[in-house]
Image (cartoon, rainbow, N blue to C red):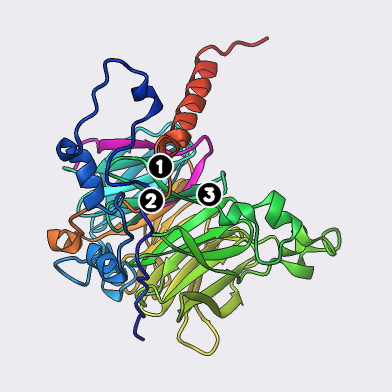
Amino acid sequence: MEAENTFQGGPVPVNGMQRKLQDEDRFNPRFKPLPPEEDEAWKELIKCGGAGEEADTPEQQAKRYETANPRSPETHPGLEDFCYGTPDVVITCSMDYLIRSWDTKSYKKIQEFEGHLNFVNQVVTYREDQILSCSDDYTCRLWKMGEPGKTGELLITYWINMYPMKAVCALPGQRAAVGGLDKTVRIFSLVTGFTLFRMLGHKEGGPDKNFFQLEGCGAIFSLLHLRQNLLASGSDDSTVRLWDIDTGKCLSVEIGHQGYREDVGEPGVGWTLSERFATVTKMCHLGKDGLQFASCSYDRTVVIWNVAPGSQLQVLKNFKAHENGIVGIGYAGKNIIATCSGDKTVKIWKLDEPEPLLLCKLTTRGIASDVCMIDDDTVFIAGGDATIRIYNWKEERDVTQFYAHDITLQCCVPVRRADVDPELWTEVPIMYQNVTYPENEEDSRAALEQMRKVLYNALHYSEV
């Protein structure tokens, strides 16, 4: 299975060769603009593709993605090399506002990362020794992993918008994508913190233009970087969408999860929202270099997706996997995935059969929220009962189970030290954008102001 070239050229620069004079500077008698030849910051923006006179050609665009080692988890996170294998560390996040890392040999806590002011909804790895998280506190935060026993170092806080952020993923060129309850997929720079693109497709409507897609739904709950410049997003409007992260264009929109339909019961039959509502909760790679991936939904189904020529989404398989909404899905081996559900079960599925084959089913005490691979026999389960459960599914036995957080775990992500190699990463930031100053920091200002109000109300609360 060979991937097609997805580079079609960069966007037309929205910034010119010289920095534009802003109103606040124009009317400041003490302000002295730098001559263009001395404005080193603007020269760097031009170098990174954020300013200039002409759009990058496809060849120039592709060159920005080059790494010394062409098999890079930054540009090709879906390769089997990076999905399959035993991790050295697993990172978890929780509703207790904390992030923790765990050794996969002893299952002892390595580090704790404290700083978020609300539920931490997702955490992902970033480059050699960093992690990126998103939270209901309107932020994404970048952390540095360090020595065991020491508190994780907070490198930078990115204020996104005045809505809870539910999904985040790292992107090539020192960028990230984030989405949440504001129904917007954002690309932002991890270097400057500025918004580069706002993609509003989930907010503006779906393929069948019905009411619940146009008015009621559109919040983003899952993001997955497929490869190079392709990003997939999943929403409570039931759609999965494919995006070009370099231009902000939506390349494909499909509904794979069809909802409960008549299984919703008599009170809901005949109502589109009741029958068709199918939040796409999570997505995972299948080791196919982003050409295939899986998603799960509240409608109890798993969908296997194919990225067809022309960057078009196709449904390969759709099967009912549980008796209640599926909240987590993870890669568990070659052609194997694990799912966890509101029916308080975790299931292991083999996908390279005419029909998905159930290999194992285990009952959980609470509703497990996420699952990932430890080795060919074992999975790491992030529990709704605040525990981590290590389970050997081939022998159908627990390896260990212990309390890991004070409240529900939200996510677990494996980390392999073998990926610590400077040749795996792009060197120059990619700053393609269609949002300029001051619009590129408007949402951040709104998020900060909202948090100030929240903290003020908390500090000055009194019973009437």
Name the amino acid type tagged 1. Answer: Thr
Q: CA distance from mark 1 to mark 3?
A: 17 Å
Q: Where is residue 153 shown, x and y percent of the image?
A: 24, 36
Name the amino acid type tagged 2. Answer: Gln
Label 2: state its secondary structure. loop
89 versus 111 height, above or below: below
- The residue that mark 2 highlights is 433
Asked if labels 1 and 2 touch by Cβ distance under 8 angstroms, the answer is: yes
Q: CA distance from mark 2 to mark 1?
A: 8 Å
Looking at the image, the residue that sits furthest to the bottom is 354
Q: Where is residue 248 shown, x and y percent of the image?
A: 45, 57
Label 3: state its secondary structure. loop
In the image, the segment drawn in magenta is 147-169
247 versus 102 height, above or below: below
Q: Residues within 10 Å of mark 1 (few under 14, many from 20)?
A: some
Point 22% across, 72% down: residue: 71
**Mark 3 or 2 closer to N-term?**
3
- The residue that mark 1 highlights is 436
